[in-house]
Amino acid sequence: MLRPGFLIVPVRRTLAQQLHNSHRLPLHHRIQPQPVQLGLPKFRIVNARPYSSSPSPSPNPNENKKDVKPQPLEEDPIPVPNTIPPLPIWQRLGPLTSLASAYGRAQRRRPWVTQFFSVLVIYFISDRCAQTIGGDEYDPKRTIRSLIIGGGSAIPSYLWFVWLSHSFNYSSHILSIATKIVVSQALFTPTFNTYFFGSQAVLSGCTPSEVLERVYNTVPTSMINSCKFWPWVTAFTFTFIPIQYRSLFSGVIAIGWQTYLAWLNRMAELKESAGAADHLDQAGASVGVGVGDVE
């Protein structure tokens, strides 16, 4: 029996002898050592495991525990009663909210037309209330006069409040509101009240002197009472009411105010009528005394 390596050792010795003898030959005749290529088959290295009939073990969860970083625990969020803010009060009034939304859409599409007809409704209601409070018989001419005056002031009043909304807006909300109130009371109130009472007198057929007397008897009183009422309404409007609903809110409040102005105008008419009657009585008495003296 041949021993392992029997054939390999002589081959190695023969190659060594040839290499040793080649040094004696010329350079171009020397045998250059060539790498020995073994005819081994090429294999693909795979992770093999010994065959076993038992099922493969499940991965150990504790294996490589040191390499795994601990995950932070997710804390449960703190429960809150309600994360959605409640709707404003003017959006929770049922049918009134629907009416206000329709008014806001009409105001955005056609602001002048909407404002004009809104003012007509306000002046009509306020005049009827004033005539009811006065206890007089209903006079349609007074209502027509109020509608004419309201229609004439609708667009200028709307433009004024739009300008006031976009003006005097400072970093301090209190300063902005205070400035708007002062400007409104100093400019708009006397101008509008003079227009209202003067127009009432003109449409009633008064003479220029009677118109001036009507304005003199009504405007100062209305301005004093306006300073007691409208600053609070203006502050509330510019603080809590959105801009698209400010004219509607002011219109609802203006029903009461226009009722007061109509009532004040009626009192001035009665005072002027009483003064004219007294003047006629005094004139008749003086005429009677003169006739008696002549007799």
Image (tube, rainbow, N blue to C red):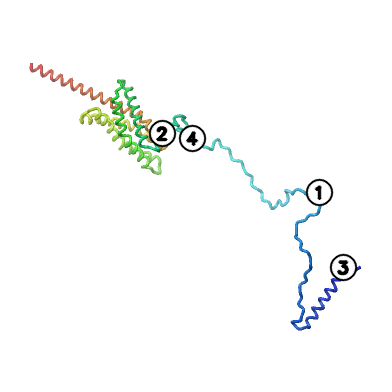
How much space separates mark 4 and mark 2, taking CA atoms? Answer: 19 Å
Q: Is residue 24 left or right of residue 227?
A: right
Q: Which residue is mark 2?
A: 103
Disc 2 element: helix
Q: Which residue is mark 3?
A: 4
Q: Amino acid at mark 3?
A: Pro
Quarter of the view holding residue 97: top left
Query: In the drawing, what numbered circle is on residue 74?
Result: none
Q: Amino acid at mark 4?
A: Leu
State which tag comes first along the sequence, 1 or 4.
1
User: What is the x, y in percent for residue 196?
Assistant: 28, 31
How much space separates mark 2 and mark 1, taking CA atoms? Answer: 82 Å
The residue that appears at 76% across and 61% down in the rendered structure is 43
State which tag comes first along the sequence, 4 or 2.
4
Q: Nearer the viewer, mark 4 or mark 2?
A: 2
State which tag comes first along the sequence, 1 or 3.
3
Q: Are marks 4 and 3 in contact (CB under 8 Å)?
A: no
State which tag comes first along the sequence, 2 or 1.
1
Q: Which residue is mark 1?
A: 54
Q: Amino acid at mark 2?
A: Tyr
Q: Are marks 1 and 3 in contact (CB under 8 Å)?
A: no
User: What is the x, y in percent for residue 193?
Assistant: 29, 32
Q: Is residue 11 left or right of residue 234?
A: right
Q: Is residue 244 left or right of residue 265?
A: right
Q: Are marks 2 and 3 in contact (CB under 8 Å)?
A: no
Counting other residues with Cα less than 10 Å from the Cα at mark 1, is it few (<14), some (14-19), or many (20 or more)?
few
Q: Which residue is mark 4?
A: 87
How much space separates mark 2 and mark 3, taking CA atoms? Answer: 110 Å
How much space separates mark 4 and mark 3, taking CA atoms? Answer: 98 Å
